[in-house]
Image (spheres, coloured by chain):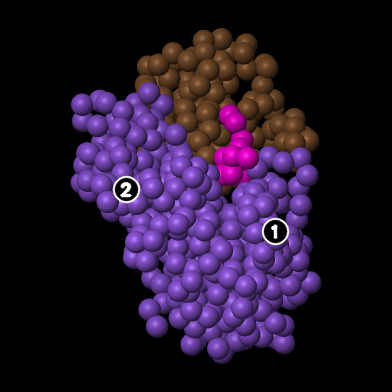
Chain colours: A purple, B brown
């Protein structure tokens, strides 16, 4: 039997020789985490409770995630919002102070170079980008704006996500101001006297926060929150199953340079003004796909039975013709069975379409379904 | 000391006469984490030692289970279809995978007893 180190299949290009650790490494080891290499960092795959238990606890209560491997980049200077719009599809100029927005860096072919959250941090733009892409993103920004803007990657900062229906009440005990924070809004505040920046957002489909803090204070913040009886730590395994059920894309799997934002179902993140004006890389393809529809679409795929259909599994139509491929798939603990997403030809993308999945030489019956698998429970204040 | 024998691939066998019950070891289930699906062989199938006999899937990964010895499949644990987590909760008991009628009991000599297997897994840490 092959015993896996599951982190290997989670990242693809993550088997780097030099494995760095985040400032929370000691907290993970003390909590009994199974550490795996991911995007060049030693990260917790799961804690002794296990992935399913951590996943369910997040949906029922609240969980702490170390996401310090992700890239935190600040850019500022005259016309920074204008400048960033030349690289991403979203409306940055219209982003109000302390509001945040999901968008994508695209390339000239309309493919996705990375997806990110941009926050207007009162004079600076704060970007949170994927761990695997952060150095490429930084290069991209520096090459484009080296003479016009200031750009800093905050390797000295940790990022802690607190996610779940009880996240707000738990965090409010230490920082009452979070109760007033709207979804996709950010603020600076203090937790136990430590300055942090809090963004009400996440990657689980639940209400929650991402807390940016200088690395030297990260363990203190983590331990304060972990001491709450309702809060448990959760690892990358649960983070992946939570985002899959929430229908959220994982860069390098569900989106990459070969997929456009429209194919990926992310056209909602391209505002009316940006559609009218264009002016982002790949605008020609992306705008024509918005107008005429893309050739293929990212869809939810619900397999019948219990066998998971994982990344790479071929999707066939009722005539046995290949119509697409699974890009993320596994077991959804809240669904209680296998869930997947992938790309299919536009004519097979209609909700309710019956398809087959080729798993180990057998065909598993499945259906195209609406995403997400688990309803989002974002804060609506 | 138990009557179990173990393979390097982390399967266990419990031998009775010329037949054996096969599963994955407690060490293996711990490494895999929460088991969510087990694909079992068909009854009557002839399997050669070292060939794939079953598939076990945890939340994160699918892993192949090899036949530690050669034989014909005489029974499979259908309880795993509805409750694959039995592999986690009772790997060497209720979480068994399949039974084999052994082709050659001499093949058992190549397997480890529990003490040797314990040393083997300790060396993997």
Name the residue that disc number 1 marks: A146
> Label 2 belongs to which residue?
A288
In the displayed structure, does residue A353 sit left or right of residue A37?
Answer: left
Residue at 70% in and 86% down: A192
- Cα distance between the residues tagged 1 and 2: 32 Å
Numbered badge on residue A380: none
Q: Which residue does the image show at 27% across and 51% down from the upper left?
A: A291
Report if residue B16 is visible in the image: no
Q: Which residue is drawn at 45% across and 52% down?
A: A249
Question: Height in image: B82 above or below A322?
Answer: below
Would you say residue A87 sits in the magenta stretch? no
Task: Please tell me whether residue A6 belongs to the stretch shown in magenta.
Answer: yes
State the image coordinates of residue A87 (x, y, percent, origin top left): 53, 56
In the rendered view of the protein, which quadrant contains the C terminus of chain A? Answer: bottom left
Name the residue nearer the viewer: A147 or A230.
A147
Span of residues in magenta: A1-13
The residue lying toward the viewer, choosing from A258 and A241, is A258
- Looking at the image, is A1 positioned above or below residue A346? above
Q: Is disc 1 in the same subunit as disc 2?
A: yes
- What chain letter is assigned to the residue under label 1? A
């Amino acid at each position: 039997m092959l015993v896996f180190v599951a982190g290997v299949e989670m990242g693809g290009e993550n088997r780097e020789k030099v494995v760095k650790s985040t400032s929370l490494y000691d907290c993970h080891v003390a909590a009994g985490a199974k550490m795996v290499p991911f995007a060049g960092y030693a990260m917790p795959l799961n804690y002794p409770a296990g992935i399913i238990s951590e996943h369910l606890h997040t949906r029922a209560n609240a969980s702490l995630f170390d996401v310090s491997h992700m890239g935190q980049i600040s850019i500022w200077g005259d016309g920074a919002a204008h400048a960033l719009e030349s690289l991403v599809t979203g409306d940055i100029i219209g982003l109000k102070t302390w509001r945040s927005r999901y968008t994508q860096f695209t390339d000239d072919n309309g493919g996705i170079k990375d997806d990110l959250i941009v926050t207007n941090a009162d004079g600076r733009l704060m970007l949170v980008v994927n761990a695997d892409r952060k150095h490429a993103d930084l290069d991209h920004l520096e090459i484009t704006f080296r003479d016009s803007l200031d750009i800093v990657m905050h390797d000295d900062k940790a990022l802690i996500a607190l996610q779940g229906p009880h996240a707000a009440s738990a965090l409010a005990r230490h920082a009452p101001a979070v109760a007033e924070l709207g979804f996709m809004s950010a603020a600076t505040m203090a937790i136990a006297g430590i300055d942090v920046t809090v963004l009400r957002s996440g990657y689980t489909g639940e209400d929650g926060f991402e807390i940016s803090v200088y690395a030297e204070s990260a363990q203190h913040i983590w331990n304060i929150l972990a001491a709450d009886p309702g809060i448990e730590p959760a690892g990358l395994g649960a983070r992946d199953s939570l985002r899959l059920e929430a229908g959220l894309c994982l860069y390098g799997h569900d989106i990459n340079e070969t997929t456009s934002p429209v194919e990926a179902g992310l056209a909602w993140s391209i505002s009316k003004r940006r559609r009218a004006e264009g002016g982002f890389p790949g605008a020609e393809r992306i705008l024509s796909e918005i107008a005429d529809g893309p050739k293929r679409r990212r869809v939810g795929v619900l397999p019948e039975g219990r066998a998971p259909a994982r990344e790479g599994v071929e999707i066939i139509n009722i005539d046995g013709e290949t119509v697409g491929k699974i890009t993320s798939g596994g077991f959804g603990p809240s669904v209680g069975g296998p869930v997947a997403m992938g790309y299919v030809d536009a004519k097979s993308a209609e909700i309710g379409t019956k398809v087959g999945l080729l798993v180990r030489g057998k065909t598993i019956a499945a259906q195209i379904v609406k995403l997400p698998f688990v309803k989002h429970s974002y804060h609506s204040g | 000391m138990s009557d179990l024998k173990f393979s390097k691939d982390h399967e266990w066998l419990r031998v009775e006469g010329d037949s054996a019950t096969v599963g994955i070891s407690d060490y293996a289930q711990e490494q895999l984490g929460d088991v969510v699906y087990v694909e079992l062989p068909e009854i009557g199938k002839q399997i050669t030692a070292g060939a794939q006999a079953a598939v076990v899937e945890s939340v994160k990964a699918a892993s192949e289970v090899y036949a530690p010895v050669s034989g014909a499949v005489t029974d499979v644990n259908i309880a795993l279809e509805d409750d694959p987590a039995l592999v986690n909760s009772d790997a060497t008991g209720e979480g068994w995978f399949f039974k084999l009628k052994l082709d050659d009991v001499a093949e058992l000599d190549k397997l480890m007893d529990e003490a040797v297997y314990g040393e083997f897994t300790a060396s993997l840490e």
